Image (cartoon, rainbow, N blue to C red):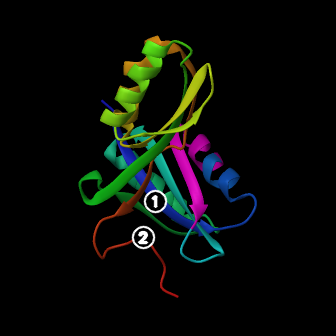
Amino acid sequence: MPKTFIISALVEHKPGVLYKVSNMFWRRGFNIESVAIGTAEQEDLARMTITIKGEEKDAEQLVSQLEKLIDVLKAARLDPQKAVIRELALIKLNAADPKIRSDIFHYVEVFRGRIVDVSPTSAIVEIVGSKDKIDAFINLTRDFGLMEVARTGETALIRGPESVRIDV
């Protein structure tokens, strides 16, 4: 049974890098479950967090292949037990009924989320946490009238002093 793996890569922050990385995964027959990219600690670098499903040997091979790409400076597979992993989701729910609106506000409090927008007929909720936490919130509130969902994908960093970085 395939396992989920999280790969962190430090890449040059320039056009075409995401294409090259995703194309490498495609050529090897791997679907990217999620990808999150943003500027890293250096302005000219970006950190990519890529989540895939596969076998142990496949994940190791993908990390090795990633590091061969010219725009990838460093790549490593993260151990979920030694990493902080988070995802952000914005979830728009139908909130026209006062009882439903009250239930939504209660669930947001329980899940330690935030209401970031309210209109007379809808509410947008922000939930940050594990993939499972976000899935649980979506499943719990689906019957209220799930209108839209936007998710960032998982992003992660290794706990403690170890890191996926290059020395300048």
* Chain part drawn in magenta: 23-39
Q: Position of residue 10 (x, y in %)?
A: 53, 67
**Does residue 134 appear to the left or right of 44 in the view shown?**
left
Q: Who's the residue at 58% across and 56% down the image?
A: 37
Q: Is residue 30 visible?
A: no
**C-alpha gap between disc 1 and disc 2:** 7 Å
Q: Secondary structure at mark 2?
A: loop
Which residue sits at x=38%, y=54%? 60
Name the residue that disc number 2 marks.
164
User: Residue 113 in magenta?
Assistant: no
Q: Quadrant of residue 106?
A: top left
* Closest to the observer, 107 or 74: 107
Under mark 2, the amino acid is: Val
Relative depth, front residue between 110 and 143: 110
Instruction: Please rate how many residues cluster around mark 2, counting C-alpha atoms within 10 Å: few if below 14, some from 14 to 19, many from 20.
Output: some
Residue ID at (61%, 19%): 121
Image quadrant in which you'd find residue 14: bottom right
Residue 91 coordinates in the image, percent (x, y): 53, 30
Residue denoted by label 1 = 8
**Relative image position of residue 149 (x, y in whole percent):** 56, 29
Amino acid at pointer 1 = Ser
Q: Tags 1 and 2 in contact by the CB under 8 Å rule?
A: yes
Does the stretch in magenta take in 30? yes
